[in-house]
Image (tube, rainbow, N blue to C red):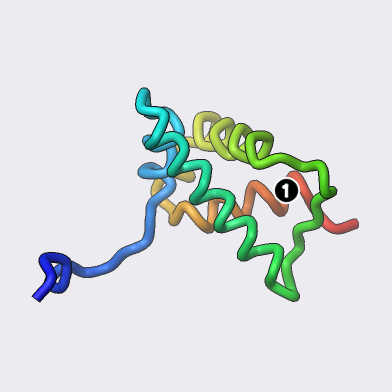
Amino acid sequence: MPAQAGKSIRFLTASELQASLLSQQEEIRFNGRNYIMGVVDTLMLTKSSPICMQEQTEINQITELVKLQLQQRPELLRYSAASVVREVMAANYPCV
């Protein structure tokens, strides 16, 4: 049996995402950025998504917005990382 078989699977918390984004290790920061990109890609594929971005929007801009919100609103750290990314995207890239 694989070593992971006995472990339960859980979602990434916003606190864990913040730790990744603030890490001194470039690879860990890269992983956090890629997590955000995956959430955004998923949101963009959802038909009912309230998010509209222009083609020139870059993942680094979005990453900085998420990082800023996590720093300014520590109450968000207890939620799932995906839900925080979705909230940041909906607030900053609404469909109007």
Query: Is 59 placed left or right of 76 in the picture?
Result: right
Q: Is residue 22 above or below residue 42?
A: above
**Picture residue at 68% right of the left edge, 35% below the top:** 61
Q: Quadrant of residue 5?
A: bottom left
Observer-nearest residue: 37 or 78? Answer: 37
**Picture residue at 69% right of the left edge, 72% below the top:** 46
Q: Position of residue 96 (x, y in %)?
A: 90, 56
Observer-nearest residue: 80 or 41? Answer: 41
What residue did someone put label 1 on? 91
Query: Is 58 placed left or right of 71 in the picture?
Result: right
- In this view, the residue farthest toward the top is 24
Quadrant assignment for the N terminus? bottom left
**Picture residue at 63% right of the left edge, 56% below the top:** 40
The number of numbered discs placed on residues in the rendered structure image is 1
Amino acid on which disc 1 is placed: Ala
Q: Position of residue 65 (x, y in %)?
A: 64, 36
Q: Position of residue 27 (x, y in %)?
A: 39, 35
**Picture residue at 64% right of the left edge, 60% below the top:** 41
Observer-nearest residue: 27 or 67? Answer: 27
Query: Is 9 placed left or right of 38 in the picture?
Result: left
- SS at badge 1: helix
Q: Position of residue 2 (x, y in %)?
A: 13, 71
Q: Is residue 93 above or below residue 30?
A: below
Observer-nearest residue: 37 or 8? Answer: 37
Say few, some or many: other residues with alpha carbon within 10 Å of mark 1 (under 14 / 14 to 19 / 20 or more). few
